[in-house]
């Protein structure tokens, strides 16, 4: 990453990192988050995950790596699952974002959350918000997946605790 890199892109790792040379003026972003329109001034380098956690205090979306590989930061952007550490907040301007905090209805857990709870699909829970968001998206695209479909569909989400068996079981239960 060099001083002459205006976008703050670290070529060696392929992700956006902090770089004092990229600090410019603030940019205004309008993002609908969990159904509520938000207007915020952010640094151009602000990642979507940092915007959610630090500007909006939506800390259910976790950060588990800095290499776009763990999926702990998965949210829905205009209905599609995305890793929110791979996007700038400015890139989500004009879009709708749903986080784990936005999937319950009238205080009732989302069916996917219930399935994870009932099938012991978590241990420490760190990967769980991202796993749940990815699983909801998976079932939207494939409402009746096989076990293999679920394993393939969640391959971008890493869990250090469960061995995946109960996570897969949870998603299959939610699909019934
Ligand atoms: Fe985004 Fe790991 S924190 S993929
Ligand atoms: Fe601990 Fe998945 S439950 S990382």
Image: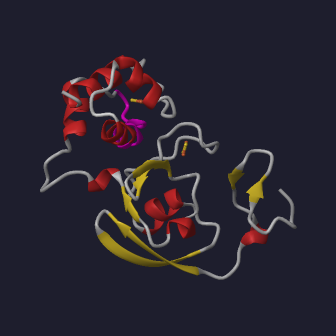
Question: Split into 4 quadrants, where in the image is the N terminus?
Answer: bottom right
Q: Which quadrant of the view contains residue 127?
A: top left
Q: Is residue 115 magenta?
A: no
Is residue 57 placed above or below 29 in the rendered structure? above
Give the quadrant of ligand 1. top right
Find residue 110 and report its horizontal and vertical position in percent.
Answer: 20, 44
At 46% from the left edge and 25% from the top edge, which residue is drawn?
A: 152
Find residue 32 and report its horizontal and vertical position in percent.
Answer: 36, 69
Q: Which quadrant of the view contains residue 33?
A: bottom left
Would residue 176 be found to the left or right of residue 172 on screen?
Answer: left
At 29% from the left edge and 54% from the top edge, which residue is drawn?
A: 101
Pick whichever, 112 or 23, lies toward us: 112
Is residue 147 placed above or below 125 in the rendered structure? above
Q: Is residue 129 magenta?
A: yes
Find residue 78 and report its horizontal and vertical position in percent.
Answer: 40, 59
Would residue 88 be found to the left or right of residue 93 on screen?
Answer: right
At 46% from the left edge and 78% from the top edge, which residue is drawn?
A: 40
Q: Please say whether residue 62 is visible from this viewpoint.
A: yes
Find residue 79 and report its horizontal and vertical position in percent.
Answer: 37, 54
At 26% from the left edge and 31% from the top edge, which residue is drawn?
A: 116
The residue segment tinted magenta is 123-133
Question: Split into 4 quadrants, where in the image is the C terminus?
Answer: top left
């Amino acid at each position: 990453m060099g001083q002459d890199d205006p976008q703050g892109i670290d070529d060696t790792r392929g992700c956006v990192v902090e770089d004092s040379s990229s600090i410019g003026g603030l940019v205004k972003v309008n993002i609908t988050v969990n159904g509520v329109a938000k207007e915020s001034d952010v640094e151009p380098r602000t990642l979507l995950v940092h915007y959610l956690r630090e500007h909006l205090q939506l800390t259910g979306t976790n950060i588990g790596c800095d290499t776009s590989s763990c999926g702990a930061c998965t949210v829905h952007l205009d209905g599609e699952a995305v890793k929110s550490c791979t996007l700038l907040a400015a890139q989500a301007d004009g879009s709708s974002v749903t986080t784990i905090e936005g999937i319950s209805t009238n205080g009732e857990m989302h069916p996917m959350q219930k399935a994870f709870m009932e099938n012991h699909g978590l241990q420490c829970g760190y990967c769980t918000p991202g796993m749940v968001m990815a699983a909801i998206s998976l079932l939207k695209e494939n409402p009746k997946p096989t076990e293999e479909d679920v394993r393939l569909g969640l391959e971008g989400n890493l869990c250090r605790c469960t061995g995946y068996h109960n996570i897969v079981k949870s998603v299959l239960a939610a699909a019934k």
